[in-house]
Image: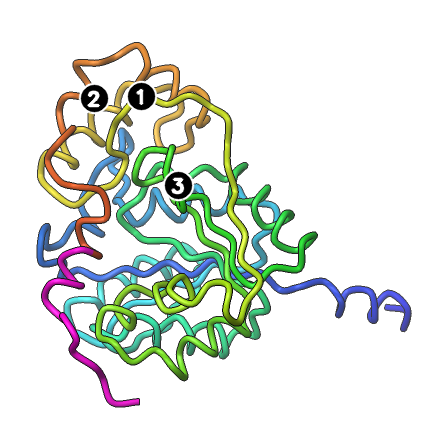
């Protein structure tokens, strides 16, 4: 490789998609490895398969816990050729920081393993916007118009490191981007990303048994299963109010975050 080519490649930000996953979910234990797809794919396999369609993501890393029950998550990820970092169960922010640091990330896309409908095209577009605008944080859910489960967050390593070093509330350690969102304009370049597509009111995340039933029915109905086009998903749901009704209203948006805030109150953690 010529020196000029090497210098050019070194200027390209290294983008990691980090997927937080564990088997010990309090609301739906074992969901990460539950079978959901027409080909018996697990929830985690569906998330990984869709991320592999992203052209702007250089590496996928699963950030799971050191708990014995998550040995199975590591085994699945390894079988699929995906890197794994294992760390604290409760300090998810630390998991992200160490996973990003060990894999030399410049830019991190935050993904949760309970969202099997993530849009690869939207992820790629948001990474491009993030880099072009030289942002520290970009999200499409400041004024959420998309269904829960299509949320995407992109964060710079600098902002992630600052969060890791300074976030002191328990819910900020559990919910990775809360510290920077709470301090958005004080220290960082923050951006919002909006898509113009019209979506019906629906839930595209898996937190409850009804969500699992909905996800299985959708993936067994839509062409290409877990590899579906997001436009096809939207068309299916716009035409299928009875399908949407399977899990609509089972939980408020960002239920996990709100529960974490309520439970932690002003609880702080030792840094």
Query: Label 3 vs label 2: CA separation?
Result: 22 Å
**Badges 1 and 2: C-beta atoms under 8 Å apart?**
yes
Q: Which residue is mark 2?
A: 244
Closer to the chain start, of discs 1 and 2, is: 1
Q: Nearer the viewer, residue 41 or 198?
A: 198
| Coloration of the structure image | rainbow
Which residue appears at 41% of the width and 75% of the height?
Answer: 163
Q: What are the residue bounds of the magenta stretch?
A: 258-271
Label 1: element kind: loop
Query: Label 1 vs label 2: CA separation?
Result: 9 Å
Closer to the chain start, of discs 3 and 1, is: 3
Closer to the chain start, of discs 3 and 2, is: 3
Which residue appears at 29% of the width and 33% of the height?
Answer: 39
Q: Judge left or right: residue 30 versus residue 147.
A: left
**As drawn, which residue projects farthest toward the bottom?**
270
Q: Quadrant of residue 236?
A: top left
Q: Residues within 10 Å of mark 3 (few under 14, many from 20)?
A: few
**Badges 3 and 2: C-beta atoms under 8 Å apart?**
no
Q: Judge left or right: residue 75 versus residue 99.
A: left
Q: Nearer the viewer, residue 122 or 34?
A: 122
Q: Nearer the viewer, residue 123 or 250?
A: 250
Query: Which of labels 1 and 2 is toward the front?
Result: 1
Q: Position of residue 84 (x, y in %)?
A: 38, 68
Q: Which residue is mark 3?
A: 143
Q: Residues within 10 Å of mark 2 (few under 14, many from 20)?
A: many
Q: Which residue is mark 1?
A: 200
Q: Position of residue 160 (x, y in %)?
A: 47, 72
Q: Position of residue 207 (x, y in %)?
A: 16, 45
Q: Position of residue 169 (x, y in %)?
A: 25, 76
Vertically, is 237 above or below 178? above
């Amino acid at each position: 490789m010529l020196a000029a080519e090497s210098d050019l490649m070194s200027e390209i930000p290294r983008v990691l998609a980090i997927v937080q996953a564990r088997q010990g979910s309090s609301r739906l234990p074992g969901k990460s490895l539950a079978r959901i797809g027409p080909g018996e794919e697990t929830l985690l396999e569906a998330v990984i398969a869709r991320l592999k369609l992203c052209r702007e993501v250089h590496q996928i890393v699963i950030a799971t816990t050191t708990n014995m029950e998550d040995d199975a998550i590591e085994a699945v990820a390894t079988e699929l050729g995906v890197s794994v970092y294992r760390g604290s169960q409760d300090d998810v922010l630390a998991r992200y920081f160490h996973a990003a640091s060990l894999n030399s990330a410049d830019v991190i896309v935050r993904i949760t393993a309970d969202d099997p409908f993530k849009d690869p095209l939207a992820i790629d577009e948001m990474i491009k916007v993030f880099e072009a605008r030289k942002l520290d944080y970009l999200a499409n859910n400041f004024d959420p118009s998309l269904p829960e489960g299509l949320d995407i967050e992109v964060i710079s390593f600098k902002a992630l490191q600052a969060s890791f070093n300074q976030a002191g509330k328990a819910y900020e350690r559990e919910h990775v981007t809360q510290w920077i969102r709470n301090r958005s304009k004080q220290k960082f370049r923050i951006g919002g990303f909006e898509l113009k597509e019209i979506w019906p009111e629906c839930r595209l995340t898996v937190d409850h048994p009804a969500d699992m039933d909905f996800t299985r029915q959708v993936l067994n109905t839509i062409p290409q299963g877990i590899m579906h086009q997001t436009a096809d998903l939207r068309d299916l749901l716009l035409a299928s109010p009875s399908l949407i009704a399977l899990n609509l209203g089972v939980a408020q948006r960002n239920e996990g975050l709100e529960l974490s805030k309520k439970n932690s109150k002003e609880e702080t953690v030792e840094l």
